[in-house]
Image: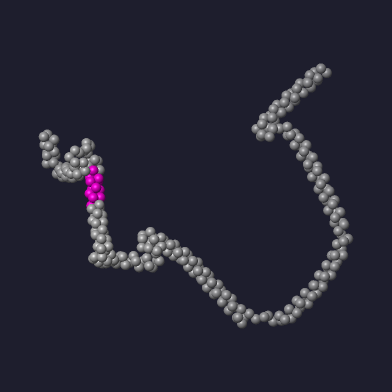
Amino acid sequence: MDSEADWAASALFSPSKARLQQAQARDWSFVEAWLVRQYGKRLPDFERNENTLHVLLNLASLSEAADEIRIGIDRVEKSAIRTYQNISSGSGIGLQEIISQSFDDEGRQYLNAMVETCIDIDAPSCSALDIAMCLTDMVSRQFDLRQQLKAVVRQHVALKQEQIRLTHVLGELRDNTLQPADGLSETTAEWQRDSRHLRAKLGEYNDRIAASRSSTHQTLSLENYMHLREELIYYRNQRERLSDQAEAFENLPSNAWSAQTTMEAARDDLRDLIANRDRLFEALATKH
């Protein structure tokens, strides 16, 4: 009683809260009626809060929508069975007329459009999969053709530009301003005479070179031999010098760190030997 009085008092002082509580009460009534249809009068125990109410409302709405869809499917199946029975018994109108009469004007328009589309795209059937595959293939071929058309257009533009350039060159060649210079024939005859003279001189020089080649070949070969011998001696001395330098590092390890450690140890030994030598020298000088 106190809670009802509190609810009435809060509703009196907060109309919006009162409307919200009334809406929740109607929702709970709707949910409870749906639960009664599902489970009978013995309802399962559950926590009553806003989250539970929201979930149960969604379930109830989806369940009623599914029931309506199930009823519609059942009605269509029964109608199809009756139609098939009428066609099988030979009574009534044909299946095509029944299907045609079941469409309104807009539906017939859509059906005709789909049939015309299937014919235009050469689809094997009017199924959505075949239509989609044909349309996809058509779009792919259209894209390839567009790319080829763009390439042809580019080639056409390039050929037009080349045609304009060649036409301009042809016009320049046909221009009367391109006339041979005065005395061109005399100059050409002079060039021909010079060419014959140079050809004769060239033959003479070739003969001289062939005659002198046998006498100079031995001298050139001897000079080359002496030059190669000097280079051989130089490189041999270089190799011996480098071999002597490499012998000092022959016993070093291949690792750089180990080699450095060995070098440091050798330096320490050298310092010890120098110090020992100095001590011996000082001792010898003191005795004398």
Q: Image check: 83 left or right of 166?
A: left
Magenta span: 56-68
Q: Is the image coloured rainbow, by chain, by secondary structure, or in one colour?
A: one colour
For the stretch drawn in magenta, what is the main secondary structure? helix
Residue 187 vs residue 255, the one in the foreground: 255
Q: Position of residue 52 (x, y in %)?
A: 24, 40
Q: Is residue 120 placed above or below 237 in the rendered structure?
A: below
Q: Position of residue 192 (x, y in %)?
A: 76, 77
Q: In which quarter of the image is the N terminus?
A: top left
Residue lying furthest top in this view? 287
Q: Residue at position x 49%, y 66% from top?
A: 148
* Location of residue 272 (image quadrant): top right
* Location of residue 185 (image quadrant): bottom right
Q: Image check: 240 left or right of 122?
A: right
Residue 95 in view, yes or no: yes
Residue 210 vs residue 280, the one in the foreground: 210
* Location of residue 258 (image quadrant): top right
Q: Is residue 58 placed above or below 123 in the rendered structure?
A: above
Residue 106 in view, yes or no: no
Numbered marks: total:
0
Residue lying furthest front in this view? 89
Q: Residue at position x 78%, y 37% from top?
A: 244
Q: Is residue 224 magenta?
A: no
Residue 268 vs residue 158, the one in the foreground: 158
Q: Where is residue 175 in the image (x, y as percent from the top left)?
A: 60, 81
Q: Is residue 68 placed above or below 159 in the rendered structure?
A: above
Q: Position of residue 285 (x, y in %)?
A: 80, 20
